Image (cartoon, grey):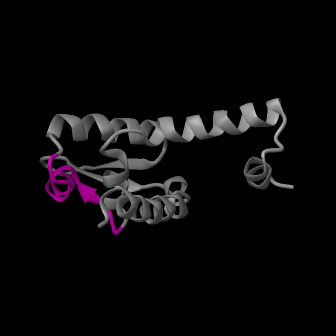
Amino acid sequence: MDTCKKIEQGILDQHECNHALLAVRDALEVLNGKWKLPILITLSDNPKRFKQISKEIDGITDKMLSKELKILEANKLIERTVYDTFPPTVEYSRTKHSLSLADVILALKDWGMVHRKEIIGK
């Protein structure tokens, strides 16, 4: 029986439960905050330059975008490519590893829509 079924049925032993919770905590730590998922979604279509990302994400400051891009890069969710031009051109794109989040993002969207309807009726 897989871990998800065991969690649903409440039959995980303490070690399995701790291991599952650790994995969930790790995932939430990587994706936490207001901006990481919007940045990843913005980069879904194709690579973008810093200012393109900034324009597409309403309300993010350049300082915050820079910080979040560095964190996403450190977690191997995006790549930063510097082109040898004058002035230098920098593009950001999603890694293959980040593409594995597609189902997670879709599930969060679906749950968010249900939750929103439950809470505010919209």
Residue found at x 22% / y 54%? 53
Q: Quadrant of residue 19?
A: top right
Q: Which residues are magenta?
A: 45-59
Compared across the picture, whether 111 is left or right of 61 comes to right
Residue found at x 57% / y 35%? 25
* Residue 23 or residue 99, whichever sits in front: 23
**Magenta segment: does it hold 91?**
no
**Magenta segment: does it hold 46?**
yes
* Quadrant holding the C terminus: bottom left
Q: Quadrant of residue 52?
A: bottom left
**Residue 121 percent coordinates (x, y):** 31, 65
Residue found at x 44% / y 36%? 74
* Residue 98 or residue 89, whichever sits in front: 98
**Residue 94 percent coordinates (x, y):** 42, 56
Compared across the picture, whether 87 is left or right of 14 comes to left
**Residue 64 percent coordinates (x, y):** 22, 36
Total numbered labels = 0
* Quadrant holding the N terminus: bottom right
Compared across the picture, whether 3 is left or right of 116 comes to right
